[in-house]
Amino acid sequence: MTTVTDNGLGIIGVVDAVTGQLRARILSGEIRSGEPLTEAAVAQHYGVARPSAKAAIEQLVASGLLERTAHRTARVVGIDPATVRDVYRTRTRLESAALRELAETRAVPPAAVAANDELLAMAPGPDPATVDPDLRFHTALIDALDSERTGRMYRSVIDEVRLCMAQVQGRRLLDAAAIAAQHRDMLDAVAAGDADRAAALLHAHLGSAEERLVEALGAD
């Protein structure tokens, strides 16, 4: 049993702590697709009250990592080809618009450069450790727009994005050096003010990951 203590944070802090630990276990694959998560089991595992367990589960349902129908136990979402395509194409719509807007002013986000530098420093080859800097690179493109609502919209699918990315790299489908090179090309296009090229490079970049994961899921 893993105990989550209050530490003066109150019920909201406890709920956030449980949510964070459940999210990490789902994204790491410790809790697998289709596995049920009951309020009683979560409460017992973390040593929290049932209302706190219920609130944590509901947060993960809202973020897309858990699903449940009326009066049914929540389960970890299954990643199927249709889900992958919808997640990646939602990303492409939002990030493509962001790149076009950034290219208008040739604004290269420093946070995106820093995240890509981390990828460049990694050993060549597929590695699950690329997921975090890779996602921070893409999130930096959205955050550079300085729009609270656009950022909130992007983050509404961020857990599903991370789950798909974890699936891609868990299967070791993409090379870290190739990811970084594609990112760099996108930033170079932004710096040159070439919005069409930046958007086209993003489409190719995300489309490749989408197709490889869909193909892998089909093989499974």
Image (spheres, rainbow, N blue to C red):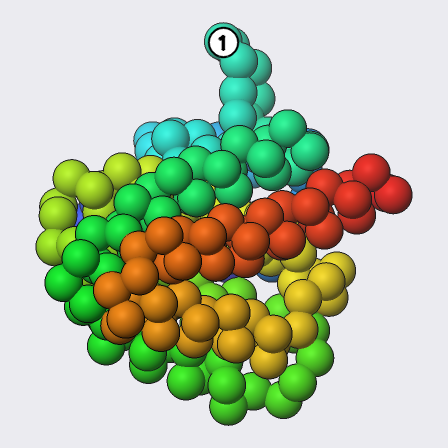
Residue 29 visible somewhere in the drawing: no
Q: Whole-percent x and y of residue 79? A: 65, 37
Which is more toward the observer, 91 or 72? 91
Label 1: which secondary element = loop
Vertical placement of 132 versus 202: above or below? below
Q: Whole-percent x and y of residue 129? A: 57, 74
Tell me the amino acid under the disc marked 1: Ala
Name the residue rendered at 63%, 89% in the picture. 123
Q: In which quadrant is the N terminus drawn?
A: bottom right
Q: Quarter of the image holding residue 83?
A: top right
Name the residue rendered at 66%, 73% in the picture. 175
Q: In the image, 66: left or right of 48?
A: right
Vertical placement of 2 versus 89: above or below? below
Q: In which quadrant is the C terminus drawn?
A: top right
Q: Whole-percent x and y of residue 194? A: 31, 61
Residue extending furthest right? 219
Name the residue rendered at 14%, 63% in the picture. 105
Residue 174 visible somewhere in the drawing: yes
Q: Whole-percent x and y of residue 43? A: 46, 40
Q: Which residue is mark 1?
A: 70
